Image (tube, helix red, strand yellow):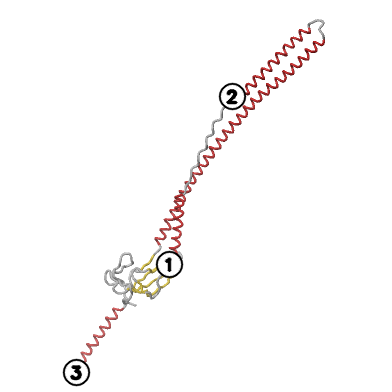
């Protein structure tokens, strides 16, 4: 009976060792999800989309701290920020651009209505000369008729009077010509005035039409500027929204990058990668703004052991 006691004790000792080994294996086996609420996971898979492999800021084996940058589409961000600056300059230029309204056409002084005083005086003088010449011719005719009735009249007298009549007739012709010339000068002056009036009306009409066209162009330029402002502002909003939508991936926990697996390229041209983060023990609950959060006193040195590594 006594001989069986050592054997039993040996069996009990072996059983204790087996239990300890089983407990150790269970502790170091990786757990994908926490077993208690608000407990940090032991392994975290992060999927990111980038346009260039250089946008991935970590490599396999890196130890990272809470909030450390994992992925950032730097090239896209720089391009969009450059576009935003250019659009902002364009917007400022449009906002400070000055569109001057056209000046109304100058009003020329009215054209005075001519009185034709000189022309009328010349006509009156010429008409008086014509009347006088006609009166002299009439009197000369009467004189010649009287002389023709006298007996024994010298032929030389009749010839002289006849010559006088011819001279009076020439004077009458000259007076009629001067009278017609005076009438023509007044007609020319009246025509020149009508031409001046027509030119003035045409000039005023042309100036008004030109002003209306300039005003229409001014209003069109205002509409074009407002349209460009609206389009530029819309483009600014689109670029700012695109910048805001660029994913900046930061680590929610401290730990080590165990694996980076490239999944391929999508139809949008973005490269997809799967990052496996082994979370350091004692990471605790999540901090707001991260994926699951980390405690505020997490050591960023990265020296604590990683579970499941």
Say if 98 sits above or below 263 in the image: above
Kindly report the distance in space between the C-alpha atoms of the residues bearing marks 3 and 1. 73 Å
Q: Which mark is residue 280?
A: none
Of circles 3 and 2, the one toward us is 2
Observer-nearest of 292 and 13: 292
Kindly report the distance in space between the C-alpha atoms of the residues bearing marks 2 and 1. 92 Å
Residue that numbered label 2 is attached to: 115
- Give the residue drawn at x 59%, y 24%: 115
Residue that numbered label 1 is attached to: 50
Kindly report the distance in space between the C-alpha atoms of the residues bearing marks 3 and 2. 163 Å
Answer with the quarter of the image where residue 246 lies: bottom left
Observer-nearest of 302 and 171: 171
Look at the numbered disc 2 and give the secondary structure of its residue: loop
User: Do the residues bearing badges 3 and 2 touch, measured as CB atoms within 8 Å?
Assistant: no
The C terminus sits in image quarter: bottom left
Residue that numbered label 3 is attached to: 3
């Amino acid at each position: 009976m006594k001989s069986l006691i050592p054997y039993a004790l040996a069996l009990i000792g072996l059983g204790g060792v087996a239990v300890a080994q089983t407990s150790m294996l269970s502790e170091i086996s990786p757990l994908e999800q926490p077993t208690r609420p608000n407990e940090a996971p032991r392994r975290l898979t992060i999927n990111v989309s980038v346009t260039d492999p250089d946008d991935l800021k970590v490599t396999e084996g890196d130890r990272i701290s809470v909030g450390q940058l994992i992925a950032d589409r730097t090239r896209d961000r720089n391009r969009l920020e450059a576009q935003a600056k250019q659009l902002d300059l364009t917007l400022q230029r449009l906002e400070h651009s000055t569109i001057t309204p056209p000046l109304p056409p100058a009003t020329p002084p009215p054209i005075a209505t001519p009185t034709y005083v000189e022309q009328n005086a010349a006509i009156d003088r010429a008409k008086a000369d014509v009347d006088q010449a006609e009166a002299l011719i009439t009197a000369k005719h009467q004189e010649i008729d009287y002389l023709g009735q006298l007996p024994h009249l010298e032929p030389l007298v009749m010839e002289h009077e006849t010559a006088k009549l011819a001279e009076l007739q020439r004077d009458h012709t000259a007076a009629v010509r001067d009278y017609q010339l005076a009438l023509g000068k007044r007609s020319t002056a009246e025509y020149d005035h009508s031409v001046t009036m027509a030119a003035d009306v045409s000039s005023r009409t042309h100036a008004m039409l030109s002003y209306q066209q300039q005003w229409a162009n001014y209003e069109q330029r205002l509409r074009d500027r407002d349209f460009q402002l609206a389009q530029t502002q819309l483009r600014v909003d689109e670029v700012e929204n695109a910048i805001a939508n660029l994913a900046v991936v930061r680590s929610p926990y401290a730990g080590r990058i165990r694996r980076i697996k490239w999944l391929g390229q999508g139809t949008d041209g973005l490269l997809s990668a799967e990052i496996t983060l082994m979370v350091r023990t004692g990471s605790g609950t999540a901090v707001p703004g991260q994926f699951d959060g980390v405690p505020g006193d997490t050591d960023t040195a990265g020296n604590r052991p990683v579970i499941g590594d």
